[in-house]
């Protein structure tokens, strides 16, 4: 579910839950012609309370709105019906901790590259975005923080030349690491990413950062696993184990809410 606790008067009103409800209310503005767009700031106040009550009265059909949005409740599920096709606001709903700048940077590339790589069903999109969200810290990290020196000379990564550890450190929304992987991606796309400048593009260019994640996804046959809803095997193929599994599950549940319904 996309909220962990109820939002409303005398509720916990966790900031992420409140922001989620604000995003959903703004998605339903067309059904509430007298309501102004809410600030999606995670702060619960009179404007958010009034919008919830107006939604319950006008859209849910409640004669006595309680101004409360419960996880799995009727108000939340009715809000979900107003979720539009994939767009920046949907991505913000999924990556609730990503700022507007990051969402703006990546959403169009995701919208273009996912279907081009067969990530073209709601379930495939949900699994892909959940894993990307974990791997990138909700778009905050597109390049490995460490220097890459730890990869120097590692033959299993194809790092055969001095400086390859730093040159081919992890980059992309699902991180590409090592000379051999950069070379394979270069061959697949017909662009040389093994030069110093080419390698840096994997992180600095949002389309390439998204595309390399899509390339990893398809070359590891993850669409087929997504069709089976097999988050465990998907995680193992990306991570080599189950590190961060609870977070991946949480992001999958959130992504499913916004793109699967």
Image: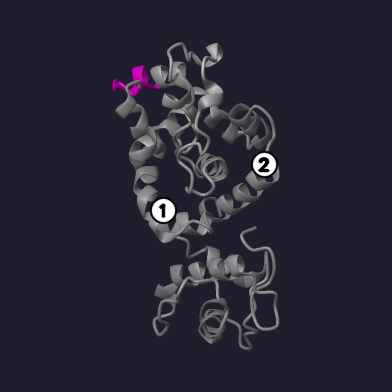
Total numbered labels placed on residues in the image: 2
Circles 2 and 1 in contact, beta carbons < 8 Å: no
Q: Looking at the rendered structure, which numbered label has been put on residue 102? A: 1
Q: Is residue 87 visible?
A: no
Is 195 contained in the magenta span?
no
Few, some or many C-alpha atoms within 10 Å of disc 1 (few <14, some 14-19, many ≥20)?
A: some
Does residue 37 sit above or below 87 in this rendering? below
- In percent of width and height, residue 154 lies at 55, 15
Quarter that holds the N terminus: bottom right
- In percent of width and height, residue 207 lies at 34, 39
Image position of 231 (left or right of 55): right
- In percent of width and height, residue 257 lies at 57, 55
Badge 2 or badge 1: first in the primary sequence? 1
Does residue 157 sit above or below 171 in this rendering? above
Q: Is residue 41 visible?
A: yes
Q: Residue at x 70, y 78 (%)?
A: 11
Determine whether the residue tagged by mark 1 lies in a helix, strand or loop. Answer: helix
**Would you name the residue on which mark 2 appears?**
244
Few, some or many C-alpha atoms within 10 Å of disc 2 (few <14, some 14-19, many ≥20)?
A: few
Q: Residue at x 48, y 65 (%)?
A: 82
What residue range appears in magenta?
185-193
**In which image quadrant can residue 190 be found?**
top left
Does residue 244 sit above or below 50 in this rendering? above
- In percent of width and height, residue 149 lies at 52, 26
- Nearer to us in this view, 159 or 130: 159
Image position of 132 (left or right of 70): left
């Amino acid at each position: 579910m996309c909220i962990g606790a109820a939002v409303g008067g005398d509720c916990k009103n966790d900031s992420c839950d409140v922001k989620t409800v604000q995003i959903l209310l703004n998605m339903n503005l067309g059904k509430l012609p007298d309501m102004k767009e809410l600030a999606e700031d995670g702060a619960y106040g009179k404007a958010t309370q009034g919008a919830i009550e107006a939604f319950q009265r006008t859209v849910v059909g409640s004669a006595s709105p309680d101004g409360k949005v419960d996880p799995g409740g009727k108000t939340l599920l009715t809000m979900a019906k107003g979720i539009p096709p994939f767009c920046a606001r949907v991505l913000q709903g999924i990556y609730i901790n990503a700022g507007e700048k990051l969402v703006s940077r990546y959403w169009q590339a995701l919208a273009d590259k996912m279907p081009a790589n067969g990530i073209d069903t709601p379930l495939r999109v949900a699994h892909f975005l959940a894993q990307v969200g974990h791997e990138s810290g909700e778009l905050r990290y597109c390049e490995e923080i460490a220097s890459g020196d730890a990869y120097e000379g590692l033959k299993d990564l194809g790092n055969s030349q001095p400086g390859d550890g730093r040159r081919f450190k992890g980059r992309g929304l699902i991180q590409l690491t090592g000379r051999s992987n950069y070379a394979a991606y270069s061959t697949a796309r017909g662009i040389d990413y093994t030069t110093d400048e080419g390698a840096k593009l994997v992180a600095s260019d949002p389309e390439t950062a998204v595309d390399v994640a899509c390339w990893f996804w398809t070359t590891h046959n993850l669409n087929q696993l997504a069709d089976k809803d097999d988050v465990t095997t998907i995680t193992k193929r990306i991570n080599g184990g189950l590190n961060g599994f609870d977070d991946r599950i949480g992001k999958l549940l959130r992504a499913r809410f916004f793109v699967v319904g």
